[in-house]
Image: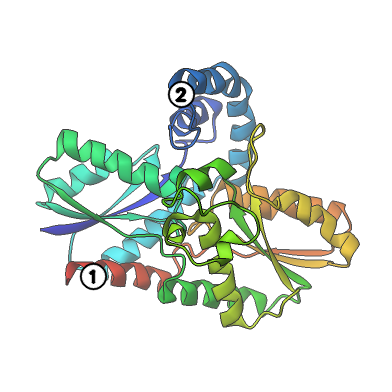
Amino acid sequence: MKGALLINLGSPESPDPKDVKPYLDEFLMDRFVIDVPFLLRAFLVRGLILRKRPERSAAAYKKIWWDEGSPLIVLSKRMFEKVKKQTDMPVSLAMRYGKPSILQGLQELHDQGVDEVLLFPLYPQHAMASTVTILVLAEELRQKHFPNMKFSDVPAFYNKPDYIQNLADSMKRHLDTFEYDHLLFSYHGIPERHIRKTDITKSHCKIDGHCCQTKSEAHQFCYRHQCFETTRQVVELLGIPEGKYSQTFQSRLAGDKWLEPYTDVEINKMPAKGIKNLAVVTPAFVADCLETLEEIAMEANHQFKEHGGENFLAIPCLNDDDAWSATVAKWINDWANN
């Protein structure tokens, strides 16, 4: 029997430091997130980062926490419930970090008689720290617990027409009621070395301003190229003129060269350039989370106005949008019928 497993990032159990700390430990100790040797990673994470970071992160989570729980989990569950109603096969929901775990999701499918699973990472663009870590962990769990299961997976859908249409339509609904001077596409940042590590040609990804626009088989796994392509296609569909939009990367850690330009730096410059009304969309995420609700809708909003901006719109993610939920169900059903 066929079944599907939807997989998102995850969240702490609560915004309390005692729950945030183990979540951060699981996340930051992932070898695909901080990709250095284990002992160095353990020193950085457990010896340095986790001494103070849980309290700071907990304070941020408390700002966005809903009565029902973590927004990411709540929104993912809402979308999941809509998807289940539009497919006849078993579908489960899991998180890469925290609960419900990927092991729980696979066990749930196994208990329903599923032996062929479609792994569906809920990330439009391919990256080591999102797509790859999900697929690697799922395979490790399969070998250990479910050796008779077969896996397929949904590739990065950054340029799939259904997704682009859903994203553009969602954005348009919000932009139609907001007179914006500029539209910013803010994607989650990653270290530049991750781009080079995922370059299957071992030579194409130079991050020199040209490689992402030059055709290459490296693009099927290049996060940076895929971000630019999502932006290009949405802008084309919405008819947004050159000069009225730009693209940046957010959420960097200190110590490494991360993809540029940086969202916070660019937003703070905008009011001086005459941009007083700014709209920001975050297409690296399909569900609102700490990075969209706190980092953009709260902090970036505050900084923009501190630097002279007037009106700020944080466009919500697709979340449990009916059309997006229908697209997810369609892709699952198409796979099942092949």
**Residue 177 is drawn in which quadrant?**
bottom right
Secondary structure of residue under mark 2? loop
Question: Which one is nearer the viewer's eye here, 264 or 209?
Answer: 209
Residue at (35% x, 44% y) in the render? 134
The answer to whether one can see residue 250 in this image is: yes
Question: Which residue is drawn at the image coordinates 40% and 56% (left, top)?
Answer: 122
Pick the quarter of the image with the N terminus: bottom left
Image position, residue 10 (x, y; %): 43, 43
Q: Between residues 296 and 257, which one lies in front from this camera angle?
A: 257
Q: Amino acid at mark 1?
A: Asn
Gap in Å between the C-alphas at discs 1 and 2? 41 Å
The answer, for residue 101, to whether it is visible in the render is no
Q: Residue at x 68, y 51 (%)?
A: 260
Write down the residue under mark 1.
333
The earlier-in-sequence mark between 1 and 2 is 2
Residue 268, x across and y down, in percent = 81, 53
Q: Position of residue 200 (x, y in %)?
A: 41, 51
Disc 1 packing (10 Å; few <14; some 14–19; many ≥20) = some
Left or right relative to 2: residue 67: right
Density class for disc 2 (Cα within 10 Å; few <14, some 14-19, many ≥20) is: few
> How many numbered discs?
2
Residue position for label 2: 37
Residue extending furthest toward the front = 203
Residue 56: which quarter of the image? Answer: top right
Left or right of 280, for residue 113: left
Type of amino acid under label 2: Pro
